[in-house]
C-alpha cells in the first residue's frame, strides 16, 4: 500500500450505544478505511472513501445529555463523523489525542476528496 495511515481509533455506528476500540487502516489506492478488531487480523468492516461521502469535524460538539450527565460531556471530543450512502450510514471515529485526530481527519479527507475534479 502506498500512502496509507493506520492506528487505533474508537468506532461507533449511529445505531450503537457503545464505542469499540478498533485498528483502522486507510488504503489510499483503494480509497477505503478498513476496520479490524486487532492489528493482526482481517478487517471486520470497511468504509469506501468516495467523493460523495461527508466527513464532519465534531471536535467541539456536545450532546443534549451533556448538561445532565457529566460522563457524556466530551462524548464527541476528537471525533470525526462519516456519512456514507446518502447519509443512511453514519460512523463516528474518535482519536485519543488532538494530534491523532488532526492526522486522521486530514488523511480521510485527502483520501476521499483529492481525486475530485482530476
Image (cartoon, grey):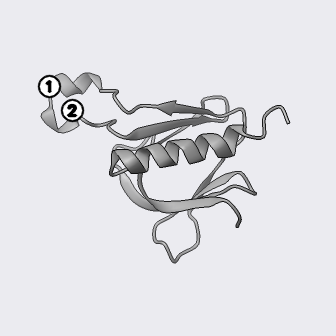
In the displayed orientation, state which residue is furthest to the right.
118
Looking at the image, residue 75 sits to the left or right of residue 29; the answer is left
Q: Is residue 87 above or below residue 37?
A: above
Q: Residue at x 17, y 38 (%)?
A: 71
Residue 62, percent across and down? Answer: 30, 27
**Residue 8 sits in which quadrant?**
bottom left
Q: Earlier in the sequence, mark 1 or mark 2?
A: 1
Question: Is residue 72 in sight in this rendering?
Answer: yes
- Say what secondary structure mark 1 lies in: loop
Looking at the image, residue 84 sits to the left or right of residue 79; the answer is right
Question: Is residue 94 in sight in this rendering?
Answer: no
User: For the C terminus, which image quadrant?
Assistant: top right
User: For the N terminus, which image quadrant?
Assistant: bottom right
Residue placed under numbered mark 2 in the picture = 73
Report the number of numbered marks: 2
Q: Residue at x 38, y 33 (%)?
A: 59
- Say what secondary structure mark 2 lies in: loop
Q: Is residue 17 above or below residue 54?
A: below
Looking at the image, residue 88 sits to the left or right of residue 65; the answer is right
Q: Which mark is residue 68?
A: 1
Q: Residues within 10 Å of mark 1 (few under 14, many from 20)?
A: few
Q: Which mark is residue 2?
A: none
Q: CA distance from mark 1 to mark 2?
A: 9 Å
Amino acid at each position: 500500500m502506498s500512502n496509507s495511515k493506520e492506528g487505533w481509533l474508537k468506532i461507533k455506528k449511529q445505531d450503537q450505544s457503545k464505542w469499540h476500540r478498533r485498528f483502522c487502516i486507510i488504503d489510499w489506492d483503494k480509497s477505503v478505511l478498513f476496520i479490524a478488531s486487532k492489528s493482526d487480523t482481517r478487517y471486520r468492516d470497511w468504509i469506501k472513501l468516495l467523493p460523495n461521502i461527508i466527513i464532519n469535524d465534531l471536535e467541539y460538539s456536545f450532546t443534549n445529555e451533556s448538561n445532565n450527565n457529566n460522563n457524556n460531556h466530551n462524548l464527541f471530543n476528537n471525533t470525526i463523523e462519516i456519512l456514507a450512502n446518502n447519509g443512511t450510514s453514519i460512523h463516528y471515529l474518535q482519536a485519543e489525542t488532538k494530534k491523532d485526530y488532526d492526522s486522521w481527519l486530514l488523511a480521510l479527507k485527502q483520501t476521499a476528496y483529492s481525486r475530485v475534479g482530476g
